Image (cartoon, helix red, strand yellow):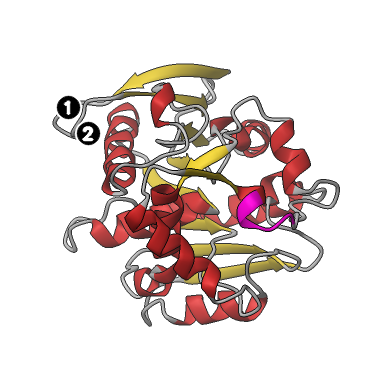
Amino acid sequence: MVSHQSAQASPAENTKGDAFGYRKWISKEVEQDVVIIGIHGFCGASIDYANLGNFLLKKQPKTGLYAYEVRGQGSDPIYERRGDIGDPQDWYRDLFAFTQLVREQHPDAKVVWFGESMGAMIAAHAWREAPENDPPCDGLVLSSPIVRFRDDIPAWTPGLVRVAATTLPLARISLDALAGGEDVQMTQTSVHSAQVQKNSYNVEKHTLRLLGALARHIDSMNDCAASFRTPVLVLHGGKDYFNNDSDMRGFIARIPAGVSKTYHSYPSAYHLLMYDEKKEVIFKDIERWTRRFR
């Protein structure tokens, strides 16, 4: 019941008419009334949603899941584009185009965007870019969003990336070089360097303009929160390297009053919640939250 397909977006909806791959976890036994669209994170791929997709097939098949390959990441079909993003607006256009494709397949279903890490930033910014009177989705799940730069990150690091992205946009650098050799714990049993080595879709070096785009997205995440007008679920690991509980609560506080917002923090979890050792607890929270759309 799980398939991997190639989707061709309409040129009218995706300015370049590019093809991009996706995976779907859709039961053929029932009609889906809620469909989740997964937007994976940095150095990730659509396969990162397999654990959640298989859980839903087993526990709640009326909730379907699609996840597509994000432009500029390791499964981008255009090899030269991997590790780069020419215009971040293309991230939003791809998401809008893919959402339209999913709505055509499931015209009566509610659509929920589910962004993980960088994918959460793409979802948040795409929402802000959408017309105010035409919500692009019915709900938002933001898993491990990076909502600000940590206070103990040297102040020159984000600034240097921005300056370098302007002067040498196509120069490439590895994350290891940027982090000065510091590794990041991503799950209870893996660090970033070990995690990416297992992935065939890993990109070793990224352009400075892509890293600069990510820095700008982090800077404006709190502004995005103020634009939300649909139910929001925020998921966070208590041991996440990038942000702490206070950061998350500050972000959520900026979501307008009257907008439904739910926050789940998992004290022993790290950044990659869909790979967490207690991931089924997290998946049950996601499944319970989606019941509001039925």
Q: Toward which corner of the image does residue 32 lie, by quadrant?
A: top left
Q: Nearer the viewer, residue 153 or 14?
A: 153
The mark found on residue 179 in the picture is none
Q: Nearer the viewer, residue 216 or 172?
A: 172
- Name the image quarter holding the N terminus: top right
The percent position of residue 280, horizontal first and vertical second, equals 75, 47
Task: Tell me whether circle 2 and circle 1 mark residues in contact (CB < 8 Å).
Answer: yes
Magenta residues span 177-181
User: Is residue 187 placed above or below 68 in the rendered structure?
Assistant: below
The percent position of residue 142, horizontal first and vertical second, equals 51, 58
User: Is residue 40 placed above or below 234 in the rendered structure?
Assistant: above
- Residue located at (61% from left, 74% from top): 154
Q: Toward which corner of the image does residue 198 lie, by quadrant?
A: top right
- Residue located at (28% from left, 42% from top): 90
Q: Residues within 10 Å of mark 2 (few under 14, many from 20)?
A: many
- Which amino acid type is marked by label 1? Pro
* Local secondary structure at mark 1: loop
Q: Is residue 286 left or right of residue 19?
A: right
Residue at which label 1 appears:
11
The percent position of residue 259, horizontal first and vertical second, equals 38, 73
Q: Is residue 246 left or right of residue 276?
A: left
- Does residue 105 appear in the picture of this structure? yes
Q: Nearer the viewer, residue 194 or 122?
A: 194
Most frequent secondary structure within the magenta stretch = loop
Residue at which label 2 appears:
14
Residue farthest to the right, as pictured = 189
- Residue located at (53% from left, 17% from top): 3
Mark 2 to mark 1: distance in Å?
5 Å
Query: Is 178 covered by the magenta stretch?
Result: yes
The percent position of residue 243, horizontal first and vertical second, equals 63, 70
Q: Is residue 260 left or right of residue 138?
A: right
User: Is residue 288 placed above or below 150 in the rendered structure?
Assistant: above
